[in-house]
Image (cartoon, grey):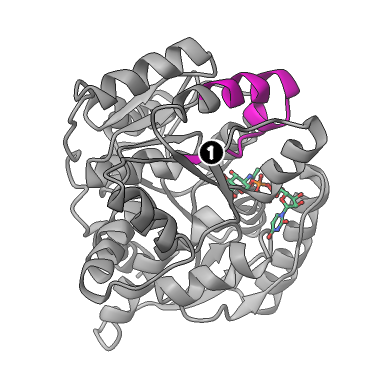
Amino acid sequence: MLIYLVAGARPNFMKIAPIVRALQAQAGSPHALSYKIVHTGQHYDRDMNEVFFEELGIPAPDVFMAAGSGSHAGQTARIMVAFEALCVAERPDAVLVVGDVNSTLACSIVAKKMQIPVAHVEAGLRSGDMAMPEEINRRVTDSIADWFFVTEPSAIEHLRREGKPDRAIHYVGHVMVDNVLYQADKLAHEGGRFENSAWKDARRAAGQRYGVVTLHRPGNVDAADVFARIAAALNAISQALPLIFPVHPRTRASLEKFGVQLDPGVTLAGPQSYMAFLDLWKDAALVLTDSGGLQEETTALGVPCVTLRDNTERPVTVEEGSNVLAGSDPDAILAHVQAILRGEGKRGRRPQLWDGHAAERIVAVLAEEIR
Ligand code: UD1
């Protein structure tokens, strides 16, 4: 029995890594699944791609499709055409997609039209914000998938409301959390010096706390006025808390295009490898972000997170975890940051089943179902 594991963009790689480990662990057992890693090439630069495979211990992809960047239609279409050819040449028994990127959408549509069953990992999340391309990707993928692996209770409710049968919904915890716990443990034991280690050491030697920033949502960085409001908030925060801001390629382009001015207290860096970035944010006083995955990873490690969005498709991180929603209003962002710096931020706890074993549960279900 052969299953394709689809990975295309940076946030997919952390989710695939524990699934590969769990599949490798059951090799040799009577119901073992064979797998192939299919990389769509949605992200392709070394620092957005290969470095994650190396650090997360993911084997080199069996297939690389080189879809590249471009418009949503162009990128999605190139992935679909290449993935269809692959599925025609070697019909897998199932296709597993993760998250909500264009590769997730493209490969699930192709597989389903060929009547190849689709497993969606991180199913059922809903922001309710149809201006986010990811929300469209999630809804379309879930409308056709066969197995739904969910990370939090809200997702079960959404899928039930959309008519999915309970037997297809599996609350397994979160592979993103499997990965961060595994890598944090590795970092604690193996350590290492990274690109920004000296920056971090200097702040700590001076007895200073620091914050970490990431931004890449089109809703924040493709609109000059929104980006300017967030930049004003970052500049104000940096008076009290030095910030380090690894910049995504999309964000870099907008910074230049809009001439966004950031104060010297905001240090810009290039995209970071997984370990270098983990090494930075795990010890930060707080994280400011619009990433989905980082909202969950900060909850997993108990680091305060201020999300620069008005909504989240991951409400458990707010209800139970260390996350707050601040939107893009500088006053709201500043108020949350000041509360955290005064020690009045919320502590949060790790949600149910966010215990590092989600991938094993997924593989157990699939081995049973595909058989
Ligand atoms: C994509 C995902 C988003 C995810 C994000 C993480 C979709 C719809 N969006 O958004 O959900 O959170 O990845 O990064 O699937 N670029 C490079 N090198 C690369 C890849 C991209 O320079 O390796 C540049 C290109 O100029 C490209 C731009 O970044 O046009 C945006 O890349 P794209 O993959 O289209 O979207 P992301 O914003 O990365």
Question: Which residue sits at x=49%, y=48%?
Answer: 99
* Mark 1: C-beta under 8 Å from nearest atom of ligand 1: no
| Residue 124 position within the rendered picture, expressed as x and y whole percent measured from the top left | 42, 36
Seen in the picture, residue 268 relative to 193 is either above or below; the reply is: above
For the point 71% across and 30% down, the residue is 260
Magenta span covers which residues?
213-233
Residue 103 lies, with reference to residue 59, above or below; the image says above
Work out which residue is located at the far top of the displayed protein and give it: 331
In the image shown, does 136 or 196 lie closer to the viewer?
A: 196
Label 1 secondary element: strand
Front in this rendered view, residue 16 or 149: 16
* Residue found farthest to the bottom: 28
From the viewer's perspective, tell me whether residue 293 is left or right of residue 47.
left
Residue 298 percent location from the top left of the image: 31, 42
Q: Residue at x 46, y 60 (%)?
A: 196
- In reply to whether residue 337 is colored magenta, the answer given is no
Q: Which residue is mark 1?
A: 266
Q: Quadrant of residue 235?
A: top right
Q: Quadrant of the C terminus?
A: bottom left
**Residue type (three-letter) at the residue carrying disc 1:** Val
Examine the residues drawn in magenta and state their main secondary structure: helix
Q: How many marks?
A: 1
The residue sitting at 51% across, 36% down in the picture is 265
Furthest-front residue in this view: 206
As rendered, which of 31 and 284 lies closer to the eye?
A: 284
Against 262, residue 173 (above or below) is below
